[in-house]
Every structure is written in C-alpha cells, then in structure tokens.
Image (cartoon, coloured by chain):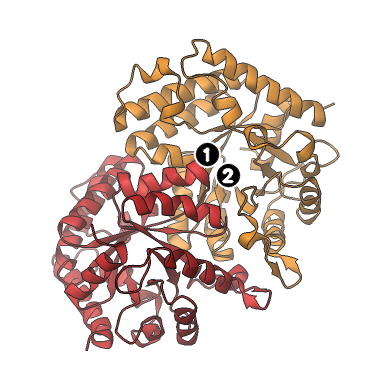
Chain colours: A red, B orange
Amino acid sequence: MEHVADRLIEAIRSRKTPLCVGLDPRWESLPLEIRRRHWPTELGRGRAFEEFGARLIDVIAPAAGVLKPQCAFFEAIGPAGCEALRQLLARARQRGLFTILDAKRNDIASTAEAYAEMAFSFYNADRLTVNPYLGRDSIEPFLKVGRQRRRGLFVLVRTSNPGAGQFQDLRCQDQPLHVHVARAVEAWSRENLGRHGFGDVGAVVGATSPAELSALREVMPSAYFLVPGYGAQGGTAEDVRGGFRADGLGAIVNSARAINFPFPPDAADWESQVEAAAHKAARELGQLYFR
Amino acid sequence: MEHVADRLIEAIRSRKTPLCVGLDPRWESLPLEIRRRHWPTELGRGRAFEEFGARLIDVIAPAAGVLKPQCAFFEAIGPAGCEALRQLLARARQRGLFTILDAKRNDIASTAEAYAEMAFSFYNADRLTVNPYLGRDSIEPFLKVGRQRRRGLFVLVRTSNPGAGQFQDLRCQDQPLHVHVARAVEAWSRENLGRHGFGDVGAVVGATSPAELSALREVMPSAYFLVPGYGAQGGTAEDVRGGFRADGLGAIVNSARAINFPFPPDAADWESQVEAAAHKAARELGQLYFR
C-alpha cells in the first residue's frame, strides 16, 4: 500500500478538489422518508444512519475524494451506531474515498494502542483525529500502530470554535501554545514523508483567520491540514487559501452540515440536493486550487 | 437524585477508602479459565470481557466504592465491547458503585452533546473524563447535558505519563499551562457545589510529585481529584496525600493493573487474588485518610 499522504493526495487529485465531506448524522435532521421506515430505537436509528450515510456516500463520491464521519453521533446510539459506522467506512472505501475517523482520541501506552486498533483495525479508517494535550507519549502509540498499517493522524492544533483560544492561544515562552503543538506535529510528520513531501501526521487548523493559516503552513511544511469551518460554519473558499502550498496541495477543507442537510426534512429529492451541494462546494474549492 | 459529588463521597465513605478500581481488560491477560471458554472473535472477546468484569465487580464491590472502566479496551473490539461495557456499568450500579467512564472525550457544540449522551445516557455513567484542549465551549455542552441528569466530569489537568509536561508544563504568562486549566476547572466546578463543598467538575491530577498535588489542591479547592499513578504505576499512598483535604475528602486514587491482574494467567483462584489486592489497596489508602 502507498504512503498514507500519497493516497490522500490521489483521492484529492482524482476529483480535482480538496473538499472533505463530513458525515454528521442526526436523527432529527434525517429525511422523513427514512425516519418513517425505522423505529427510533437504538437498532432503528443505527439502520437509519446506515441507510442515510450509504445513500449520501453514493451521491457525493464522484464529487469529493475524502469522507470524515464524526464518531460521536454514531457512538451516542450504542453498538448499532458502531456497526453502522463500520459498514459506512467499508462502503466509502469501495467507492474510492479516503476516510478520516473524527474521534479526537487521546490516551497513553496500551490504552492509546487500543484506540488505534479501534480506528485502524476495527473501523479500518485511513486517518484518525487525535488530541495532543497528553504530550508525545500519547501520540507515539498511535503512530506505532498506524505506521504498521500505513495509516495516519490529524492532530488538533488550532481549532475554529469560539473558545478555542482559551488555552490554544495562551502565550507560552513567547509563542501561542498551538505553535508549540504545531512544531511537535511537524517533527512527527517529518519522521515518515511520502513522495509529495507530506508526512503521516497532519494538523487540524481552523479557517479562523487567513493570516494564521499561512503562518501555520510555514511552521508545518510537512503536515497536511484538515480545515474545518467551511460552509455552514461561515468560512469561504478564499479564507482557507493560506493553508495550501503554491501547487494546490497541503489542505483538505471539511464541509458537513451544508452537504449533509441542505434539504427540508420532507424533501423527496434529498439525494439530488445533497449531490448538488457537494458538487457546488467541490467546484468552489477546486477552482481555487486546481486551475 | 443527590448532587454527583455527594454521591461520590457517599460511595467513598461507605467503604472508608478513596480507592477507585480501574477496569482495563486485555484479552492476553484474562484468566485462562475464561479465555478457554470464549472464541477470540469480537463477540467472544466481548463476552469474555463481560464475564471477567462482572466477576471482578462482585469481588471488589465490598472493598471499593468507585469503578473506572477504560473505554478504549472495550471499543477496540467493536459493538460487542460497547455492549459488554454497558452491562458492566449497570452491574456496578447495582452493587452500589459510583462509576467513572474513562473516555477522555472532547469536541464542541452538538458533537460534544452526542458524546455526553453516550456517557450519561447510553452508558449511564456518573462521571466522564474529558480533555480541555478545545477550550470552554468544549466543556460547556458536557456540563449542560450532565447537569440535567446530575452527572459530572473529570477534566485532564496534569497527567502522570512521562511526556505529560511537553505541553502541560509549558510556562504560559508565568504559570504552567496546567495551572491555567486548573483555574478554569475550579471556576466550572464552583458553578454547582454539593453540600461538602465539591462541585460537579473534578480534575485528573497525576501522583507525579507530592508538592504539585498540594499546590493544585489549593488552586482547585472545589474540584474532586482523580489521581492515577498508584499501584502498578509506582506511586505510594504517601505520594498522593497532597491531593486530600484535612478531613480525608478531595481525592480518589485509581489502581487498575495491580487489582485487575495480580495473578498468573493459569491461576484457578484468580478471584480471591483480585479480592485480596483490592482489600490491600483499600486498606493502605483508607488508613491514611479515614483514621
């Protein structure tokens, strides 16, 4: 199998867009057509999530090369949710999508290895999001398991939520905390570079300010960026430009709600609305970076 | 239902020890007697974890009032692991144990609420461990859901792993990062105090140095401490003294491996060895704080 960063880049190039489609199913937002056919029990919700996700994957796969399911929504409904998520990740792979499990896991030693097993073996995802607060020995076990299987990580560096700065922007020895984390990410990433110069450790960097994105691109030249905050969260295609290298590589841009739920609950043609939203976002982002 | 901190204190006082028993099942360490009766498939491992955990809960419940299962080991085996964990948490409650789900979750807005649903509704745990890196709007949704059900949190403040200092000890505006987190924890905790002066937001504080523990106790007078690093990880009962108030309240001390697996795999009397290890740890810690 190829290096995980090269596989990510292939998935992006094949669709000529850095769009990453988030998969954030919520029972209340599912099409009525689906909700009517499933009981709101754990099992019923699991099946409804699986049906919605499968149909969404089928219509977005030609537009975008990367899928990022949000673990929390599946876990909230118990084992049936976990099973649905596993099936959806398998379907995404069959459709040629690169998969990122957004689970923000963190722990140390054999506990971290157990989470890595969950992500890379049970769910068989290509990359996992992780939280760096516990320090290097909370990242290394994920890398150990991930590298055996050519998988990778996205480490939270600077997120896009309103309260992100409370700790991430604290000035520590003349630099914001998140720059210290960024330097560590760059060092981990350089340990295992693919042929495009990107490693297997990427960074979650919010589209909060274009200047900050450019600055972090310089601190982490080897790290692929996962940029949330596009679409429903208010960021525009121009806002994220700073995350990219001159050759159009370096970042994927996540959109979830605007592509998952662009329709009213009673829409009969919800799949074509999802498809249109995915193509629109893919085109907007693609025009900027793949001229 | 009583305030979550008061329920924790009741569980501690009823056994006269601040011992918290970790539940960290690993297939390779299970008694052979159990492994022989289950296939090493997902379902078989789930059943084996459930059997081991149930028998462990039954023998430790008279000795210790608090159980902390580690989510990762259950999640690594998929839906069967989640189901086993749910059953074990229910059994622990039936035995009068206070339950802490060690899952170190973190996210924002409705995603964080989904994790809170997982912890407090699906798993029905009393408290959940969470990671503070994302800032206040990653803690508040957990508090919102938790307070509706009188549940609580333990926020990672200063952990006990060798690399914990990489970020947690960075000096930020004249104080280590973890002291900034500690102050935020104290503020959240004071929002909802129980009758013993402790709130519903506690802190994970490693038994790394007795002086650090005492200092953090002063920064966070309202936060109950969850102290890892006792037993197999090398800490002694004296090392953790700084985490306690003069009245013996203020901290629970976790021991997992030394109580889960004090026996060789082929031991026929493994339950009595677990029981003895639990009583020994309970007594050591109890003598210090409940004279």
Q: Is residue A155 above or below residue A78?
A: below
| Residue sitting at x 69%, y 37% | B252
Which three-letter amino acid code belongs to the residue tagged 2? Arg
Disc 2 versus disc 1: nearer the observer: 1
Q: Is residue B280 left or right of residue B155?
A: right
- Closer to us: B240 or A84: B240
Instruction: Give the image location of residue A204, x and y in percent.
Output: 43, 69
Label annotation for residue B149: none
- Residue found at x 41% / y 85%: A242
Label 2: few (<14), some (14–19) or many (≥20) C-alpha neighbours in 10 Å = many
The image quarter in which residue B60 lies? top right
Q: Residue at x 30, y 57 (%)?
A: A126
Depth check: A26 or A19 in front?
Answer: A19
Q: Residue at x 58, y 13 (%)?
A: B272
The spot of residue B19 in percent (x, y) is: 68, 31
10 Å neighbourhood of mark 1: few (<14), some, or many (≥20)?
many
| Whether residue A41 is visible | no
Quadrant showing the N terminus of chain A:
bottom left
- Residue B186, located in which quarter of the rendered image? bottom right
Residue assigned mark 2: B151
Q: Is residue B196 visible?
A: yes
Q: Assess whether mark 1 and mark 2 are in contact (beta carbons under 8 angstroms).
A: yes
- In 3D space, how far apart are the residues under numbered discs 2 and 1 (Cα atoms)? 8 Å
> Compared with residue A93, is residue B283 higher up or lower down, i.e. above or below?
above
In the rendered view of the protein, which quadrant contains the C terminus of chain A?
bottom left
Q: Given the image, on which type of amino acid does mark 1 rest?
A: Ala
In the visual, does B229 lie left or right of B111? right
* Residue placed most toward the observer, A183 or B58: A183
Label drawn at residue B125: 1
Hey, which residue is sitting farthest top in the picture?
B268
- What x and y, as percent, mark residue A188? 47, 64
